[in-house]
Amino acid sequence: MKIAVIDGQGGGIGKSLIEKIIKSDLRNLDIIALGTNALATAGMIKAGARTGATGENAIIVNAGKVDVIMGPIAIVIPNSIMGEITQGISLSIGNSDAMKILIPLNRCNVEIPGTTAYTVGELIDFAIEELGKIQKNSSQ
């Protein structure tokens, strides 16, 4: 199963996702780091992604080639992450047939009720559990 982890700025959420995926018992996953900038991509590759690419075009091209897209919810909101998420990026992710597992962070002027009781680490753990369910269902 091909997974794209998409993040911007320093790639902290993406890095944490990749580290937890690798530590999980999930196998046969091809993790691709897609950063809006080189720092984000490098951090995610360092965390264990097999390969990575940087920038709008890399994200647009690869969003349609993966089975699952993971990252903060901001990746589907144009102009979020301090302007790093372009309309092209958010549109390509939204239009992708890939399953999206998004971390519901209450930033970018978006409030997601029910998420304030969880830490970022707990939200990432929930995302990894969801990835496991998707992988199990796709192999049946």
Image (cartoon, rainbow, N blue to C red):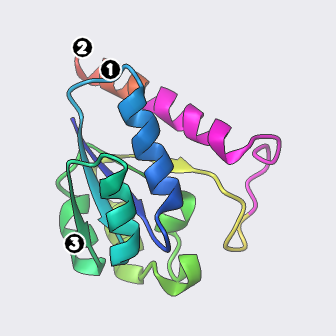
Identified at 28% across, 50% down, the residue is: 97
Kindly state the secondary structure of the residue where label 2 is placed: loop
Query: Quick check: 136 above or below 63?
Result: above
Residue 62 position by quadrant: bottom left
Query: Could you say which quadrant of the image residue 55 lies in?
Result: bottom left
Asked whether the viewer can see residue 120, the reply is: yes
Q: Amino acid at mark 3?
A: Ala
Residue 36 marker? none
Q: Indicate whether 68 appears above or below 109.
A: above
| Residue 58, numbered circle | 3
Q: Is residue 121 magenta?
A: yes
Density class for disc 3 (Cα within 10 Å; few <14, some 14-19, many ≥20) is some
Q: Earlier along the polypeptide chain: callout 1 or callout 3?
A: 3
- Residue at the disc numbered 2: 140
Judge by depth and name the residue closer to the eye, 78 or 40. 40
Foreground pick, 55 / 95:
55
User: Of tags 3 and 2, which is closer to the observer?
Assistant: 3
Residue 10, position as x, y percentages in the image: 49, 70
131 on left or right of 123 = left
Give, as a single range, the part of the protein colored magenta. Answer: 111-131
Residue under label 1: 137
Q: Residue at x 45, y 55 (%)?
A: 14
